[in-house]
Amino acid sequence: MFESGVMGGYKEITGFRLSAQRGTGNCAPTDRDVASLATGNGIRLGQSLEDLQRAIPVTFRRRGPVLAYEGVSRRAATADELKRLRAEWPNEKQYYIDVTTIVRATFNANRLVDLYVHKIESY
C-alpha cells in the first residue's frame, strides 16, 4: 500500500493479533478455533514462554505477564519501491525504508494467551 500520511510519504502497515482473551476494540469474535492457528514460525496460543522465545530469538522486556519487543531498523528499498517513491519525490536520494517491528505476548500460567504483532515500513 502506498499512501501519503503523517509518517512520511510512504507507509505500509502489517499486523495481526491472536487472542484467547475477550475481544476488545477492533477485535471481533470468531467461530474458528484460534488455538489451531499458528504463525509461519510456529507460534500458537497455548505454547510456553520458552517455546515463544525459541521461535523469536530477540530480547524481550518483561512487565508482569507481558513480554514486549520493539525493533527499529532499515532495509534497502526495492527497485519498484524506489521507482514509485522517486516519482513522488524526484529530489529525494534516500534509498532505504525504515522498519519498526513490535511484538507483545501475554502469558497466563506460562501459556501464551494473546499475541500482537505489527510492522510499519515507512519512507
Image (cartoon, helix red, strand yellow):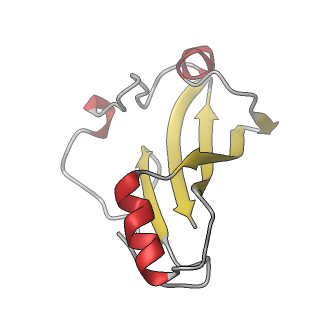
Q: Position of residue 89 (x, y in %)?
A: 52, 81
**Extreme residue in the front direction:** 91
| Residue in the picture at 35% in, 69% down | 1
Residue 104 appearing in the image: yes
84 in relation to 90, above or below: above
In depth, the one of 60 and 92 nearer the eye is 92
81 in relation to 74, above or below: below
| Residue in the picture at 56% in, 23% down | 52
Asked whether, in this view, residue 99 is left or right of residue 59, the answer is left
In depth, the one of 123 and 117 nearer the eye is 123
Residue 50 occupies quadrant: top right
8 in relation to 61, above or below: below
Q: Position of residue 93 (x, y in %)?
A: 62, 67
Residue 24 appearing in the image: no
62 in relation to 119, above or below: above
| Residue in the picture at 32% in, 64% down | 28
Asked whether, in this view, residue 29 is left or right of residue 85, the answer is left
Q: Quadrant location of the C terminus?
A: bottom right
Q: Position of residue 53 (x, y in %)?
A: 62, 20
| Residue in the picture at 58% in, 25% down | 56
Q: How many marks?
A: 0
